[in-house]
Image: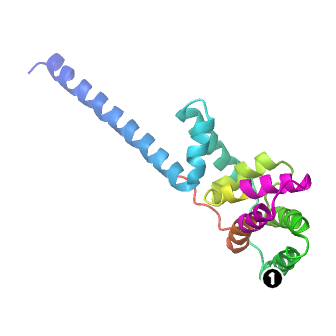
Amino acid sequence: MSTGTLLAIIIPIVVVIALLAVAAALLMRRRKLRERFGPEYERTMDDADNRMAGERELRAREKRHDSLDIKPLDNRVRDRYTRDWTSVQEEFVDRPEDAVHDADRLVTSLMHERGYPTQDFEQQLKDLSVEHGRTLEHYRVAHEVDALSVQHQATTEQLRGAMVHYRALFDELLSDGGQPRHAPA
């Protein structure tokens, strides 16, 4: 067999293997992002111009999150937040709107205590999505009800639901040990 014939066989095989390896790597990266971000993956894909742009956005969130100093809470601080949450829940009976506002402030304070920036709600969502993508929708819904309650347009049932939603993220932030994420392989 001549060298030309041999190259004509080997080069296409190498190209096909390389393409398969690239496709497998992309699929694995996509699967890891889906697992990591949960429902936030699809939300981001829906908001993005295309899948590549959406996945680029999620990787940028991971990179930003890795630069944050997210830290665990010591037991004393965790206990204080638990007591504060109990007070907020008790407040709901007599002043539901105030309780929802206080729940929002308490969750924001807890985020700040853990090391998340808290100046901008949209950025909070992006930062939280990296580690808390499965409970993030709770935060969105609760925040929307809080905004309604500022204008006294939220029903008692909506306010009750907001408390439940805030509690989901609160519990996750409170119990999360702030373990550093393993670097992507």
The range drawn in magenta is 140-165
| Left or right position of 145 against 2 | right
Q: Magenta segment: does it hold 150?
A: yes
User: Is residue 185 visible to us here?
Assistant: no
Between residue 92 and residue 46, name the one nearer to us.
92
Question: What is the total number of numbered labels drawn onto the structure image?
Answer: 1
Instruction: Work out which quarter of the rendered image holds the N terminus and state it.
Output: top left
Q: Which residue is mark 1?
A: 79
Asked if residue 45 is positioned above or below residue 39 in the image, the reply reads: above
* Main secondary structure along the magenta-highlighted residues: helix
Toward the viewer: 115 or 140?
140
Residue 61 in view here = yes
Instruction: Give the x, y percent position of residue 160.
Output: 77, 67
Crowd around label 1: few <14 · some 14–19 · many ≥20 (10 Å): few
Q: Residue furthest left?
A: 1
Q: In the rendered image of this protein, does residue 116 appear above or below residue 54?
A: below
Q: Which element is circle 1 on? A: helix
